[in-house]
Image (cartoon, coloured by chain):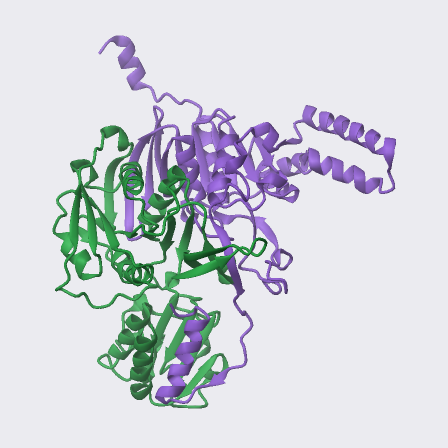
Amino acid sequence: MTEIEEYVDSQEFIVPYNCVVLIKQVPDTKRLTGRAMNDDGTVNRGALPAIFNPEDLNALELALQIKEYFGGTVTVITMGPPAASEVLRDSLYRGADDAILISDRRCAASDTLATSYILSCAVKKLDYDIVLCGRQAIDGDTAQVGPQLAEKLGITQITYVQELIELKDKTVIARRNIGNGWQQVKAKLPILLTVIGEANEPRAAAAKRLMKYKKARTQLEVAAALADENPQATGTEVKKLAALADNRCKELEKKGLLIKLWDLDFLGPDFNWCGRDGSPTKVHRIQSVVLEAKESKEVEPTPDGIAAMVHELIEEHTIG
Amino acid sequence: MIDVNTNGEVWVFAEQHGGNLEDTGLELLSKGAELADKLGVKLAALLLGDNCTTLADKLAHHGADKVYLAQHQLLENYQTNSYAKVIYDLIHKYEPQIVLYGATPCGRDLAPRIASAAKAGLTADCTDLQIGDHKISKTDKVYKNLLFQIRPAFGGNIIATIINYDRWPQMATVREGVMPMPEPDTKRKAEVVTESVEVAPDDLPLEILDEHIQEKKVNLKASRIIVAGGAGVGSKANFKLIWDLAHSLGGAPAGTRAAVDLGFIDHDHQVGQTGTTVRPSLYIAVGISGAIQHQAGMSESKKIVAVNNDPEAPIFNIAHYKIVGDLNDVVPKMIKAIREKA
């Protein structure tokens, strides 16, 4: 070993890492406040309050810990309707540096494949070392977007991460939950990690950051607020409002309070792979699971009585 | 993405670790056989590993007509990229119409990676699979014999049936333990198709440093169906009824604190305030009076069936189906009815 090599070897060189965290605003499926389905068969999202997907908070926490120890940046991205900016603000309160909302009508009806494709177009625009996602979102529980995104980015994935053991020399060692135990794996960066709930205890919002970032807005929110203030606006007034919105956005940007809004024109994807057209899976049918305990039934302890009950349970997919 | 076809086989990924086949793959073979029969095509198992030729027989016994065997030194241990690459190549070579995986941590790590590369649809955590037709209401066009991928969504508040008709293969992961596993038929034989595969060190970006497998304990929380027994079951020997009923449903056996204290069943299986809190789709309470401490651990079950000889037992207050009778008579009848219907 030369003197320099020895010197390098003896130092714990701490290099910064840029983390990108993919988050999702989801209906709180555990706190159902009304009927889950509308009469027309669509999901009644109004019955379900919107929250920060729990395991995405664990992914964000891990990214923030990496930043605290090694330096670097934490950028949060979500794809969703304009109101999804709420989880981005929440991320800023907790310590994220930058927030991006992907919102575009043409994203609607995307399944996991189309979603991961659109997200990959966004992540590719950033300079990243580590991409983090929650293992799964509680609305669909699919756990598919993480691995699909890793494939689209052409990077290695480590799913079900329960602990980050080491990050050194652009190499990560992580412990992953494999169901009936754990596995410790090592891989080179760049990498995508999907994080499970037991990985950490997500921090709360910091009061100072909350005071600052509660004013953070997307351009959509700025425009919507102006439209609300001027409901009667017509013709040239509308144009004026648009100019005013631009000005307000510029002011927010100067203060670091503008949440970036990326649409598909900006991302420049192949539209064949976005939205409904880009989604191979389609819904054939949706059935509501009756939540409130129906009137209970007396079942005769005879072969016929029991067979009729079993038949009912199979019909409603409780069995099978 | 492969072409939509109606003569492609039904494939099941036969997950194995260290030469042991996972139950989920075997469960899927019985469901896969049913689907393949309806479609009039062959059922094939996909076996990847090293020195695992002997496992092919077991796959045949569980229903595989064919076993695609891909062996390579570098396939000995599961890794996302190497397995995804081999399966992706096989899908493009043989164009199966359906590919099924267990929704195990391994299956859920692997299947989305393949789906993304193949630009194919994938439905996660299915609890049932059927063959059926789909009509596009706008055009009246009917797609025949599609794979109905049935799964709970929105935290179990709805059941969705997912299909894909224009991009194939149709792929799904299937929840562990939801498909019954019939007795193997040791006389069955399968055609073994040996595939020569190329795997390079680059396909193994992970270095597996250490692995720790815990003794398999029951995971009540993950169980869709739970069959629980109480003190009323009477003895450890009689608790076999609870295990048998649970197995017939692909569910997990459980017990009350009283049953655990009496030594009928292990504490890992205890439901209630001092045990595990569960909210399965179906909870069958057998010989359980329904103490409030027990109800606290299971009252959020979607459907509750109670069997008790005391019509005044509190468990009946929260049960959807009340069966007043002797459990030694009722439980065997239930098992028989389930076996006949399923």
Residue A127 showing in the rendered view: yes
Chain B appears what colour? green
Q: Which of B101 and B319 is in front in this view?
A: B101
Left or right side of A268 for B211: left
Question: Is B103 rendered above or below residue B219?
Answer: above
Q: Position of residue A226 (x, y in %)?
A: 79, 37
> Quarter holding the C terminus of chain B?
bottom left
Would you identify the image quadrant in which residue A230 lies? Answer: top right
Residue A163 showing in the rendered view: no
How many numbered marks does the figure carry?
A: 0
Q: Nearer the viewer, residue B12 or A99?
A: B12
Question: Is A68 rendered above or below residue B250?
Answer: above
Residue that appears at 51% across and 26% down: A126
Chain letter, purple in picture = A
Would you identify the image quadrant in which residue B254 lies? Answer: bottom left
Q: Position of residue A1 (x, y in %)?
A: 22, 11
Q: Position of residue A15 (x, y in %)?
A: 41, 22
Residue that appears at 41% across and 35% down: A150
Left or right side of B12 for A189: right
> Quarter holding the N terminus of chain B?
top left
